[in-house]
Image (cartoon, rainbow, N blue to C red):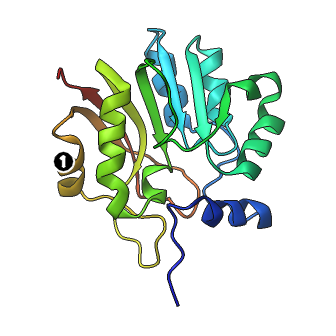
Amino acid sequence: MNEPDSSQTQFWTKRWEVGKMPWDLGGIPPALVTFLTRNQKRTTALIPGCGSGYEVQAFDAAGHDVTAIEFSAPAVARAHEVLGPLGEKVIHGNFFKHDFGKKRFGLIYERGFLCSLPPARWLDFAARMADLVLPGGRLVGLFLYGNEPEPPPFPLTDEVAAGLFGRYFKLLSTESVGHSVPVYDGKERWQEWERLED
C-alpha cells in the first residue's frame, strides 16, 4: 500500500473535510504578534499554505500588503469564513506553480507549510522562497525541529536547515517557542532568515 503523499492537494483536502487539523492554532501565534510589534517597517508579505488564514488579519492590521495562497479548497473556504472581506487576499492555488508575475515580497511567513511537505520537496521550497523574496527581504516564522516518528509533520535539523537555506539566506535569529498546538509543542522555533544578494 502506498504511503499518502502530503505534497498532494487531496491529502490535505481530506483532512480539512473531516476536520482533522491538529496544526490549527485557532488564532495568531504569539511569536508573530511580537515580531509584528517590534518590526514597524511595512512591506509586501506572502503567506504560503495559509490554512484558516488567521495570520492574514495580523499582517493586514500591521499595515502590510499581504497575499496568501492555499491549495486546498476546504481550507480556502474556511479562510473566507474567518477573514470576511479580507478573504479576497487568499489565492486558491499551488504555491509552487502559481504565477505571481513580477511581484516579489519583502517578507514571506512560514508556519506549518515546510513541515507539511515530504523532505524530497524541500529543495523546491527553498528555491521558490529564494525566487520570491527580495534581496534583503526576510523569510520568517515558525519552523519545526526535532524528531517525528510518524510524519507528517516532517521536522528539520540544524544541519538540514543550513544546507537548505544557506545558499540563499543568512540566519539572523532563532529562538524556541513555548506554547503551541500539541503536534508541534516543544519543536517550534521562531526564525528570521535574510535573503542574500544574488
> How far across and how far down the image is residue 188, in percent?
42, 51
- Image: 31 above or below 115: above
Q: For mark 1, give the secondary structure.
A: helix
Image-based side of 59 in relation to 2, left or right: right
Number of marks in picture: 1
Residue type at tag 1:
Ala
Q: Residues within 10 Å of mark 1 (few under 14, many from 20)?
A: some
Q: Judge whether residue 192 can be spotted in this image.
A: no
The residue drawn where x is 65% and y is 52% is: 24
The residue drawn where x is 62% and y is 25% is: 58
> How far across and how far down the image is residue 128, in percent?
36, 38
- Image: 196 above or below 171: above
> How far across and how far down the image is residue 86, in percent?
75, 23
Q: Nearer the viewer, residue 12 or 100?
A: 100
The residue drawn where x is 31% and y is 43% is: 126
The image quadrant where one finds the C terminus is top left
- Image: 171 above or below 96: above
> How far across and how far down the image is residue 39, in percent?
43, 15
Residue assigned mark 1: 162
Q: Judge whether residue 84 can be spotted in this image.
A: yes
- Image: 28 above or below 111: above
The picture quadrant where one finds residue 131 is: top left
The picture quadrant where one finds residue 122 is: bottom left
The residue drawn where x is 49% and y is 68% is: 152
Image-based side of 108 in relation to 160, left or right: right
